[in-house]
Amino acid sequence: MSAIYISQPGSQLHIRNHQLEISHRGQLQQSIPLDDIDRIVLFGLCHLSRPTVRWVLGEQIPVLFIGEGGRDLGCLEPQNHPKYFKTQLQRVLDCEFTRTIAQSLVRVKLHHQTTLLQQLHRECPTSDLRQTIGLLSLLADDLPAVRSLEDLRDSDATATTLYHATLVRTLARNLARNLACTLTDTQPLECCESHASRAIQWMLNLGYALLHQQIATLARNLGLDTEIAHLYLPSEHHQALACDLMSEFRPLLVDKLAISLARDNAIFPKDLTFKDVVSEDIAQHQTRTNPSRRTSVGCKAIETFASHWEMQLQTLIVHPQAGTVSFDRSLELQVEEYLACILGDTESYQPLLPQFPQNHR
């Protein structure tokens, strides 16, 4: 069983002879046995035939739609009736229980964010990294004194904003050095870091979307309602429980992958381009000095990221309770840990603080 990534916009998906056929402009591109598919990721506008829609809904195969910039546009999934809805509702209405879980999620997220920035600082020290590490450490030190859920959410939002901006700036500066070497004479050097920032942001957005879908699917399969959570609130394109449970994995899985791809120049710059776009209805009011920007992502970039993402999921870690397992398995274990906590089988939720084998990069 595996994920299928359809990187070509305009692709058509049909089911014939127990195979999922993927075509583009009338030409068959790929044929995959249905038994080999556990989720589908579509980039851009693609067409699913009615039999395909019936199949993915009937087999509960999640279909994720990814738009420009790597952003999550939503997921096609069957309606379900969560087994533990009433239990979750009772738990989330317990203010102390909710505050305790939210605090543990913010604490471990801060830990992973700080650790990752410290690793970057050791490789290439900067005042920007040093300052953000100091601010995150202060937020972590103050966390035990934060009593209300609203203040916990404020602390989480502050930390995420500081961390994310610093991470993107740091990776963009490093990537821009490589990007500058490939610019043509018509492209000014000052656009290097802007292009690199958009490239980094695309990777992060896409990684977060894939992680969100995977955890949401695991939670639904265990009978959990993905709209009932403790730290995050539901939104149009995000399921709150998935956001809660992916908090501890964002730095470990997605951010580390972005660092690795940027360091190795595995995707950029040849596979991503950035175009100025001025729509006709606003062209008369907008100058070319301030156009909107669009990230144009080639199939090769998407396929490269997807391949590295799947490999990242198979990276081995030392889980505190389960021993040596893959990241993929650790996602399942943490959702199971959360369910055990909700059911009262454990006293508290234990976020993931993994160790890595000696040969881990």
Image (cartoon, rainbow, N blue to C red):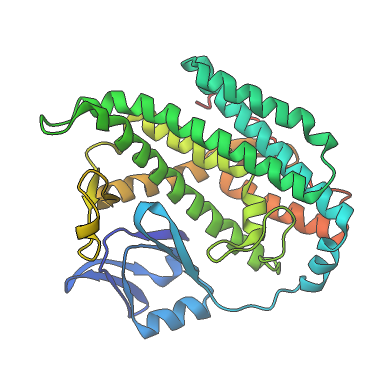
Residue at (63, 63) in percent of width and height: 234
| 296, above or below 53, in the image | above
Residue 185 x, y percent position in the rendering: 10, 29
Horizontal side, residue 270 vs residue 350: left or right:
left
Residue 314 x, y percent position in the rendering: 51, 43
Q: Nearer the viewer, residue 346 or 294?
A: 294
Outermost left residue: 185
Residue 29 x, y percent position in the rendering: 22, 65
Q: Is residue 345 visible?
A: no
Q: Is residue 237 visible?
A: yes
Residue 112 x, y percent position in the rendering: 63, 33
Q: How many marks?
A: 0
Q: Nearer the viewer, residue 56 or 45?
A: 45
| 55, above or below 176, in the image | below
Residue at (26, 33) in percent of width and height: 191
Using the rendered view, name the quadrant where residue 341 is placed: bottom right
| 272, above or below 9, in the image | above
Residue at (37, 25) in percent of width and height: 173
Residue at (38, 84) in percent of width and height: 51
Horizontal side, residue 252 vs residue 167: left or right:
right
Q: Nearer the viewer, residue 289 or 193?
A: 289
| 183, above or below 208, in the image | above
